[in-house]
Image (tube, rainbow, N blue to C red):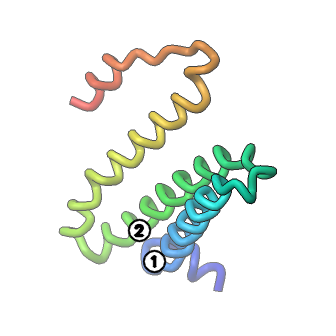
């Protein structure tokens, strides 16, 4: 059964599982902001990053399935995958590197995109 789930080319279950886990992390992220769970507030940023990461990986896995089984949908999702990767990279930069004083040359990123 594990071999079938990990075959992302012919089975989309793994992408659905990852996306649902990301959605669950998002719900946990919202719950950790409640005053009743103030004790666990320091985990909120970690859960938020995990949410984004699981959703982007799940979306990437679904892209592999769409590439082989539905080419027009793959072409439509391709731009959204690039946008989600840029969002994840930006979130990673602002959460990790900006506080440490590491500057990113955004002109290089913009040149690479065009």
Q: In this view, does 60 lie to the left or right of 50?
A: left
Residue occupied by mark 1? 12
Label 1 secondary element: loop
Q: Which residue appears farthest toward the front when viewing the image?
A: 35
Q: Quadrant of the rendered structure where residue 42 is?
A: top right
**Number of marks drawn:** 2
Residue at 66% of width from left, 56% of height from top? 34
Q: In which quarter of the image is the C terminus?
A: top left
Q: Where is residue 86 in the image (x, y as percent from the top left)?
A: 39, 39
For the point 64% across and 61% down, the residue is 31
Label 1 neighbourhood size at 10 Å, few (<14), some (14-19), many (20+)? many
Apparent side of residue 103 relative to residue 85 in the rendered image (left or right) = right
Relative vertical location of residue 53 with respect to residue 25 in this rendering, above or below: above
Question: Residue 43 versus residue 13: which sits nearer the camera?
Answer: 43
Which residue matches tag 2?
Answer: 62
* 59, 51: nearer the viewer: 51
Residue 27: image location, x then y, percent: 58, 64
Contact flag, marks 2 and 1 (Cβ < 8 Å): yes
Pinpoint residue 105: horizontal percent, then vertical percent.
40, 15
Q: How far apart are marks 2 and 1 (CA)?
A: 6 Å
Q: Is residue 88 above or below residue 56?
A: above
Q: Residue at x 52, y 29 (%)?
A: 93
């Amino acid at each position: 059964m594990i071999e079938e789930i990990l075959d992302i080319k012919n089975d989309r279950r793994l992408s659905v599982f990852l996306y649902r886990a990301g959605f669950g992390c998002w719900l946990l992220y919202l719950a950790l902001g409640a005053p009743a769970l103030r004790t666990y507030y320091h985990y909120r940023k970690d859960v938020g990053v995990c949410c984004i990461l699981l959703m982007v990986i799940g979306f990437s896995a679904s892209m592999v399935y769409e590439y082989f089984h539905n080419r027009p949908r793959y072409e439509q999702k391709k731009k959204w995958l690039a946008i989600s990767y840029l969002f994840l990279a930006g979130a990673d930069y602002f959460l990790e590197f900006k506080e440490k004083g590491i500057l990113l040359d955004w002109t290089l990123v913009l040149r690479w995109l065009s």
